[in-house]
Amino acid sequence: MAPAVVAPAATPAPFHPDRVRVLKPGSPCPSGPVVYWMFRDQRSANNWALIHAAALAARSHAPLAVAFCLSHRFLGAHARQLGFMLRGLRLLRGRLAALGLPFFLLRGDAPDALPGFLSRLGASALVADFSPLRPVRAWKDALCERLPAAVALHEVDAHNVVPVWVASGKLEYGAKTIRPKIHRLLTEYLVEFPQLPPPAVPWTGEAPPEIDWDELIGEVVREAGEVPEIGWCEPGEEAAMEALMGRKDGFLTKTLKLYDSDRNDPVKPRALSGLSPYLHFGQISAQRCALEAWKLRKSCRQSVDAFLEELIVRRELADNFCYYQPHYDSLQGAWGWARKTLMDHAADKREHIYTKEQLEKAETADPLWNASQREMVYHGKMHGFMRMYWAKKILEWTNGPEEALSIAIYLNDKYELDGRDPSGYVGCMWSICGVHDQGWKERPVFGKIRYMNYAGCKRKFNVDGYIAYVNKLVVSTRAPPRTIAAGNRQQQFDFLLSPLSQPLSASATCRQQQA
Ligand SMILES: Cc1cc2nc3c(=O)[nH]c(=O)nc-3n(C[C@H](O)[C@H](O)[C@H](O)COP(=O)(O)OP(=O)(O)OC[C@H]3O[C@@H](n4cnc5c(N)ncnc54)[C@H](O)[C@@H]3O)c2cc1C
């Protein structure tokens, strides 16, 4: 649906004061460095949290540093996600250095790693990214208790175009209730970013320790190696901008016009932006994506509007759900009508029941479902349309909605490069628990939850074409990794060895692979 806004102003707008929340006030006369605790928004450009931290530092004539806390396997991350993130951070460190900003990589969870670090620096303020997820909120609560009294803690929503707390003060029922609220606010928030000013005061404090990135990445990736890295998606801000609008293969440059017509066709994955890994790790700003897409609205109106609906409304609806619903990943978080209908049908006879292990190994009687599971396991990004079918089938084939939801979230978070994200929890909750959806005609097992089946997919797209496409992907993924970008990212899918034909040579990039 078209955003009811006038075109965003091309001239940079100042930082909107409602984008920040003061979680802890700190000293009235701050002195000492400002530290930006980067977490969800891992980028140097188009980053409101960094812009705010720089302004705070300039105001108190203090230096600014960036810190990242490397938690131990946050939300069960595997090599696939951790490798992508660390390789992105390695590049980011260089970009920050070019801006005159030191980057400190701390080991451990923020409440353990930051207080001592800030005391040592004599810091006056900590600026944090926003995340609606429970563990991050718990970290901030703990930090409010553990930080020295004089240190302020500010939280900035640099991930959403309209900050979650501004878009709505409550749990929204669905896209139709949050959409008008967000659209109304876009003139105020969908604005061009100001330039990050050079540091007001150069950093002369303790120097960040050298990081042996190869050793660090090797260690982390080995330890979490059950799900190996993928080689098709280059990490980092530069690669993210290339995926958005690169001259050779960028989404806006090359395939935007397909988005409206083909985004729900799994045989045409190139019609999608492919941006979710970058958005998840904050290597690109959704606001930058929206601003650039908006510029093309005259020539590609339907595609731009459809893209903005997903990028802004649906994504921010997911943050709204996780922020205002503490049970965002369990049946308890479903609406009453959905819980009731699911429980009414929890004991219905299922045609098939599969264990978690059978599902993980793609050992079902449905070749379409198996293909989607393999797309996720091997490629690390399942097509958006297939994600719905995939999760709904898990509801159909397990012992009730709670088991289905926990298996769907487990698999999604384990294998998707963009997993462990509010959009993932909400995607599973939408598919299995009817969140942000309406009730449909009652039927066995699903009750009033929207149903999807193989015959419907067959009518909609070339199912055999999709299965063949995934088979090719799997074969190319199992080929030796690329030497340059993938380094020694060895593919280890022994637990899922498939009886496929000869390996192809690994193809160059995601978007080439999808072509
Ligand atoms: C069961 C299930 C699980 C999902 N798991 C995840 C996940 O782990 N991580 C994740 O980022 N998304 C998830 N999604 C949402 C969506 O499928 C993906 O965001 C999308 O497929 C990513 O590919 P893309 O960037 O090429 O999509 P595009 O269609 O190009 O969309 C552009 C961006 O808009 C946002 N977006 C698109 N669709 C949705 C949606 N339905 N809800 C919220 N935001 C959306 C994403 O940020 C996406 O990157 C899930 C959906 C379902 C049904």
Image (cartoon, rainbow, N blue to C red):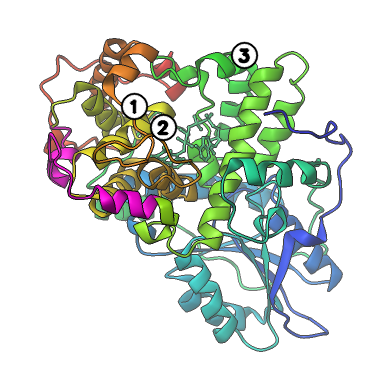
Residue receiving disc 1: 482
The answer to whether residue 81 shows anywhere in this view is yes
Q: Amino acid at mark 1?
A: Arg
Q: Is residue 136 above or below residue 227?
A: below
Q: Report the front residue among 403 and 26.
A: 403
Q: Which residues are magenta?
A: 338-363
Q: Amino acid at mark 3?
A: Lys
**Closer to the N terminus: mark 3 or mark 1?**
3
**Closer to the N terminus: mark 2 or mark 3?**
3
Q: CA distance from mark 2 to mark 1?
A: 6 Å
Q: Residue at x 46, y 58 (%)?
A: 211
Q: Amino acid at mark 2?
A: Ala
Q: CA distance from mark 2 to mark 3?
A: 30 Å
**Secondary structure under the numbered disc 2 in the rendered image:** loop
Give yes or no for contact between labels 2 and 3 (Cβ–Cβ under 8 Å): no
The yes-or-no answer for disc 2 within 8 Å of ligand 1 is no
Q: Is residue 244 left or right of residue 474?
A: right
Residue receiving disc 3: 257
Q: Report the front residue among 320 and 23.
A: 320
Q: Is residue 474 left or right of residue 54?
A: left
Give yes or no for contact between labels 2 and 1 (Cβ–Cβ under 8 Å): yes
- 408 drawn magenta: no
Residue receiving disc 2: 485
